[in-house]
Image (spheres, rainbow, N blue to C red):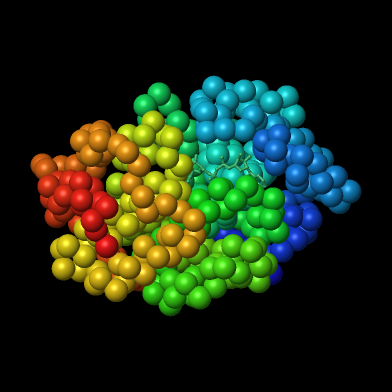
Amino acid sequence: MSKIRVRLGINSYNIYIGSGLLMQTARQLRENGFAGKLAIITNPIVKRLYGNALKQSLTREGFKVTVLPVPDGEEQKSLEVAGRLYNELTDFYSERTTPILALGGGVIGDLTGFVAATYLRGVPLIQIPTTLLAQVDSSIGGKVAVNHGQLKNKIGAFYQPRLVISDISTLKTLPTQEFNGGLAEVIKYGVIGDKEFFAYLETNLDRIKSLDERLLKEIVYRSAKIKAEIVEKDEKDLGLRNILNYGHTVGHAIESASDFKVEHGKAIALGMLAAGRISNKMGLLDKTELVRLKSLIQRADLTTELPRLEVAKIIQAMKHDKKILKGKVRFILAKALGSVFITDEVSLSLVERVLVNWNEET
Ligand code: NAD
Ligand code: GLY
């Protein structure tokens, strides 16, 4: 088992990463001072795969456990569902010290985090992420939220978990498409924070895709470490933390312009390539590194083909996303693999040119 300490003063916590950790949850809880009652929020898919066994093992170890299932899907991240969960927690006589365990992907993590942050003005949150995206990204750093109308992830808080338990063996049941979506974020960490990690992914991608446990543990560990270090420096997302959005400016716009028909991971992959091409055109990322980025995205079975969408619609979506100010777009650009910076100096016309000429570009 590997451990990462996220150092945030009194809100510091540990991330544990390893194979088979789920069944050791009782020990981790006890070591972190928890006993007695606890609630698990999960969805029916994850409950069947892991939730029932987790409940049994915690019950055997003397915990009094209730499982609160929420249907699968992004639409469950809502105030209405949070409201129902508050009632169920009250029925369970959940107290301020009763921890809530978020067992599942980013949807369960964000929703449970929001409930934990607000129920009784805050109760202990334990993240037990079961998707690659959640293990490398959403369970770390304390961004918790629900959606509301047009506001995606905008009703929320910064609320750090007390503990993150990433059992990499749960990734074995993940649908390939979800695994690849998580790989987009893993590649992102190579681009934003660690050139050597990018090269490691190039060397080992095939074994990672075959779900070799040693490599899964390594990529989750290295990604989580990069994210933890960024969060430590800018917990409230006032500056540096923005670099975690590498690829998201164009990526989100593609997702939204396609009415969310383009999956998140693929949209982010396209966004990362777009940001790479823009960087190259502005005299930053060199061609060899741009080709390496494109090739890794392709090998991860993420797409580099821009779907048939009107470029104007993508630009419009960026405007709607408020990422455009006076004809300039907020971008994370790459000087080189492993080195990025935030800038407002990207002209809309350059973004348009890259999108219009997509098939002719490197
Ligand atoms: P998800 O939570 O919808 O999970 C994807 C699918 O995998 C679901 O159908 C789920 O039931 C299933 N699943 C989960 N674990 C499984 C397992 N081990 N085996 C088989 N199936 C499993 O999607 P996600 O990609 O994990 O998360 C996306 C969400 O995360 C979005 O709502 C996004 O806004 C949020 N997010 C939050 C942050 C943050 O910092 N808080 C960062 C990135 C993304
Ligand atoms: N996923 C982006 C962040 O945590 O800031």
Horizontal and vertical percent for residue 175?
Answer: 62, 47
Q: Is residue 335 above or below residue 315?
A: below
Side of 308 relative to 329 (left or right)? right
Q: Is residue 152 above or below residue 286?
A: above
> Which residue lies at the image location 36% right of the left edge and 62% below the top edge?
294
Residue ranking furthest to the front: 360
Quarter of the rendering containing residue 286 = bottom left
From this viewpoint, is residue 69 visible?
yes
Q: Nearer the viewer, residue 360 or 10?
A: 360
> Which residue lies at the image location 55% right of the left edge and 39% below the top edge?
107
Side of 272 relative to 108 (left or right)? left
Quadrant including the C terminus: bottom left
Horizontal and vertical percent for residue 300?
Answer: 49, 60
> Which residue lies at the image location 39% right of the left edge and 46% below the top edge?
267
Q: Is residue 187 above or below residue 121?
A: below
Horizontal and vertical percent for residue 266?
Answer: 43, 48
Quarter of the rendering containing residue 73 = top right
How many numbered circles are shown?
A: 0
> Which residue lies at the image location 16% right of the left edge and 68% below the top edge?
283
From this viewpoint, is residue 351 visible?
no
Horizontal and vertical percent for residue 201?
Answer: 49, 70
Q: Nearer the viewer, residue 181 or 6?
A: 181
Q: Nearer the viewer, residue 70 or 351?
A: 351
